[in-house]
Image (cartoon, grey):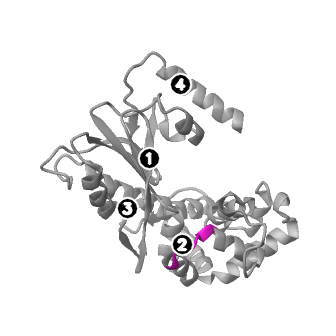
Amino acid sequence: MELTKMEGLRRALVEMKDRDVIYPDMMPTQASLRWSTVRPALVTFDRRFWQSSRCAIRPFPWEWWLEFDLQAAESRMFTGYSGDPGDLQLYQSGLDIHTETCKSLFGWSTLPPDWKGKADLRRTIAKNIRFGPYQYAKDERVILTMPGLDVVGLDRHAALAAIRRLFAAHPHTVLFKQRTWEECIRTHQARTFMGHRRMLWGKAVDVAKEGLNHKIQGGIANIIAWILIQMCHPTLSQFLPGPVPRLIVNKHDGAIVGFPARYELTEVLPRCREIVERVWEIEGTSIHFPADWVRWTSDGEREKLS
């Protein structure tokens, strides 16, 4: 897997060789409503590349970039649909959702003495379980295919017991998934909370899977599209009548937007926070979507913003 990623990055860098300026192709949305950015596929570049290659991709001298990433976007979208009281309480309390998931999986009331925070492998496993079996899988046994379980002390029986504990603690999640699967199979369509419809064809198991994916991932894509319209649309941008920011690259749960140097960060960031970090009403549930922010300077330096 690692070699495949490296080969993909190598091919992309070969395409960029001897080119002073690169304008990636942003292709029409996929069925999932995600965008395809190619030549080069910037969104697939490994995070380590961005950290170590500031000189390779950076703003023009006359602009600076603002990057935002919605925090736990799919998990928040899923919770908005399910209305699960436990997950809603976690988000409202500001606790780390993946740490709390880890506690549920392992049956902990408090964190163990050897807890390493976000670097703890058990938290990583819990995060992968939340974004996999917990949110999308029809069969709890899919957890047995996940790598790393034995490293954190979960054998076959312990892993199944862990996922069952998690489901038992979140009955609204189970009901939402079952209701969504049945509706998709019956109607052969799924809609995001904004009403974006996707027709579904094929076997029942595929229809159910793609329908749930569309509601979650398509809902995130709807939010990002709405945000970019508010920022970058030539006639609808909230930055008019001044120069309109330009889209640098769109990601699944965020984007990088370019601002002319005349704009000050102190002027731009509060306005962007109002656009991006808002409460959305998702099928009767109000849920807040916070974001992480990074400023890119024209010399390639990146500054995390609080």
* Residue 180 disc label: 2
* Residue 13 disc label: 4
- Residue visible at 49% across and 21% down? 15
Of the numbered discs 2 and 1, the one sitting upstream in the chain is 2
* Residue 196 disc label: 3
Q: Front-most of 137 and 259?
A: 259
Q: Is residue 175 above or below residue 49?
A: below
User: Could you tell me how far apart the alpha carbons at marks 3 and 2 are, in whole angstroms?
Assistant: 15 Å
Q: Which residues are magenta?
A: 93-98
Instruction: State the SS at label 3.
Output: loop
Q: Is residue 33 above or below residue 95?
A: above
Q: Would residue 90 appear left or right of 19 to someone viewing this image?
A: right
Image coords of residue 233 (percent x, y): 23, 48
- Residue visible at 71% across and 77% down? 104
User: Could you tell me how far apart the alpha carbons at marks 1 and 3 are, in whole angstroms?
Assistant: 36 Å
Image coords of residue 157 (percent x, y): 87, 71
Q: Residue furthest left?
A: 241
User: Could you tell me how far apart the alpha carbons at marks 2 and 1 are, in whole angstroms?
Assistant: 41 Å
Check residue 284 for magenta coloring: no
Of the numbered discs 1 and 3, the one sitting upstream in the chain is 3
Q: Is residue 197 above or below residue 300?
A: below
Amino acid type at circle 4 is: Leu
Disc 2 packing (10 Å; few <14; some 14–19; many ≥20)? some
* Residue 303 disc label: 1
User: Could you tell me how far apart the alpha carbons at marks 3 and 4 are, in whole angstroms?
Assistant: 36 Å
- Please name which of the two marks, 1 or 4, marks the residue nearer to the observer: 1
Instruction: State the SS at label 4.
Output: helix
